[in-house]
Amino acid sequence: MTTVLVDVRFAGTFTSAKEYTPATGEVGAVRRLTGDEVIRPGHGLLLDGDGQGVAVAVEPPGRGLAVEVRLVPQGETAERVLLLVTGQEPVEVTEGVTVSGGDVVVSGLAGVLSRIRVVAFDGRFDPSTLNGGRAHRATPADGPAEPGWRVPIGNGDDVVARAALVRPTERQLAWQALERTAFLHFGVNTFTGLEWGYGDEDPDAFQPEDLDTDQWARELKAAGFTLAILTVKHHDGFVLYPSALTRHCVASSSWRGGKGDVLREFADSMRAHGLKVGVYISPADEHEPTYANGSPRTPRRIGDLTLPSTDYGGYMLGQLHEVLTGYGPIDEVWFDGSQGRIPAGHVEEYDFDSWYALIRRLAPEAAIANCGPDVRWVGNESGLAREDEWNVVPVTVERERVDVARYDAPDLGGRDFLARAEGDFLQWWPAEVDVSIRPGWFYHAEQEPKSADELMTIYNESVGRGAVLLLNVPPDRRGRLADADVAVLREWSARIDRDFARDLAEGAARTADGDGVVLDLGGPARIQRIVLAEDLRHGQLVESLLVEAEEAAGWRRIAACGTVGAKRVITLPAPVEAARFRVRVLRSRAPFHLKAVRLFA
């Protein structure tokens, strides 16, 4: 078999590359590849993090299969190689590969591409496994899966055992620790009364007479929020900073003499008050004339990258570049999959792969949410996570957009669900629960906010089920958080602080007891709330557990739950008084790691 790889030029520097010569089968020493070097046809490329490596084989020579090389981190010291194989037509790589944030991404493809699927392997690739353009799925014969952020699903696999191997990235761990995050829907819709604008609104309609982003930040910080996301551009296309790419922005409003910049004030205020900064840039755009114009994907230069995109995809690349280079550091970039009001026969296939590559280059620590690789939409806008919300779920990946088969499924990662999993991978993909404090997402004077009781239910059934809450608090026409909303936020935050004020288990004697732990408080205490957490660095492994209190007659069950994950809050129907409590894990996918057992009155 002749091993052939089309010319692949590396932009940036990648240190874990080896050259492979098919004629001799020899593997060269690790060497640094720079933007001036090319892997020539007739050579394969071997990439590794642990000495095993992968060779790319294409037969017959010159057929033109394009290969995208993607590294999946396996902790801090190792990586696993995934290769995206595509194309039954000749494909030319006009620019090659860019390296960003640990990812090696092919760009600049020209030619007719077929449907992309992922192939993962540890040895020589056999092209005969290709079937009608669909790449071979890993099977047990391909070797055991290694722990990682994304693990291939193979035919005949023990899928639950593979799920136990999935681990979060450091970026995901940091994001999951945020717990309470805020959404701020603000724009021309605030002044027109619409929820989804048409793109033909007069920019001069935007007139926040008393914009006070410091007030936003003060109140959000006081309410326990850790990050806030601003709708920099909603579906109407109006942009909240002075953009060089469009006149449909604040620069075309008479507000502040055309010199206003909401994004600048927002970012500065959030950081000044210790909150992280997120941006929502709508993929749908009712104003931009290139949207869904039918243009093909072509290589486009943006910064030091060349990335394939449509005309509109290039416009979005420009907006992302403006935001990420002019207002950083950005901690979360939030997309959705909504399509605009597209004429019949037209569609805008979003260039998520290129957008994500640019984000990884310019904001490598930013979580990419919703359709992105880091964060999953929970599947509703009611503020509720599933009773058992799994971080490890089966996914499909198309042009780097990650999806599950059914967002409204009552279970996305349990044992029975995995047995019939639809997808090519198991991935660590934690849930973000988005909900608005008001009936609408934008401020409408006639609407009232939810009560503190309702927000408390949302907190317990989102954060308390291991998800991250994204609560929308829309600024009003003054440019301030509405007084009624602020009052509810303050009451809600005080409730959380009161309910979880003192951990009665702090300082308790803890002893291992089979598949659990016993807490001896040293004397009787009345508890009504139990908070549990797994050490997610080892995965999400607990499937069911019991909480028991010791009485004169022995141990009595007082609560039970399924999985734990990042955080599990259990509220007892009535207080229980005891001196000793026991948490007993009934089932786990592998040896589990509970990092927190906390008890509250």
Image: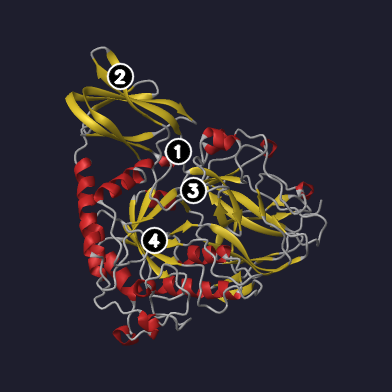
Q: Amino acid at mark 1?
A: Gln
Q: What element does badge 4 sit on?
A: loop
Q: Return the residue at label 4.
A: 331
Q: Return the residue at label 1.
A: 540
Query: Which label's residue is closer to the chain start, 2 or 4?
Result: 4
Q: Amino acid at mark 3?
A: Trp
Q: Nearer the viewer, mark 4 or mark 3?
A: 3
Q: For mark 2, does the 10 Å Cα neighbourhood hold few (<14), some (14 to 19), or many (20 or more) residues? A: some
In-front residue for pair 123/172: 172
Is residue 89 left or right of 145 when viewed as pictured? right
Q: Assign the C terminus to one quadrant of the image.
A: top left
Q: Return the residue at label 2.
A: 556
Q: Return the residue at label 3.
A: 429
Q: Quadrant of residue 312?
A: bottom right
Q: For mark 4, does the 10 Å Cα neighbourhood hold few (<14), some (14 to 19), or many (20 or more) residues? A: many
Image position, residue 162 (x, y; %): 56, 37
Farthest residue in the left direction? 523
Q: Quadrant of residue 205?
A: bottom left
**CA separation, marks 1 and 2?**
27 Å
Q: Residue at x 34, y 75 (%)?
A: 191
Q: What element does badge 2 sit on?
A: strand
Q: Is residue 29 above or below residue 326?
A: above
Q: Residue at x 21, y 64 (%)?
A: 483
Query: Which label's residue is closer to the chain start, 1 or 4?
Result: 4
**CA separation, marks 2 and 4?**
45 Å
Label 1 near label 3: C-beta < 8 Å? no
Label 4 near label 2: C-beta < 8 Å? no
Is residue 457 left or right of 365 when viewed as pictured? left
In-front residue for pair 420/51: 420
Q: Nearer the viewer, mark 3 or mark 2?
A: 2
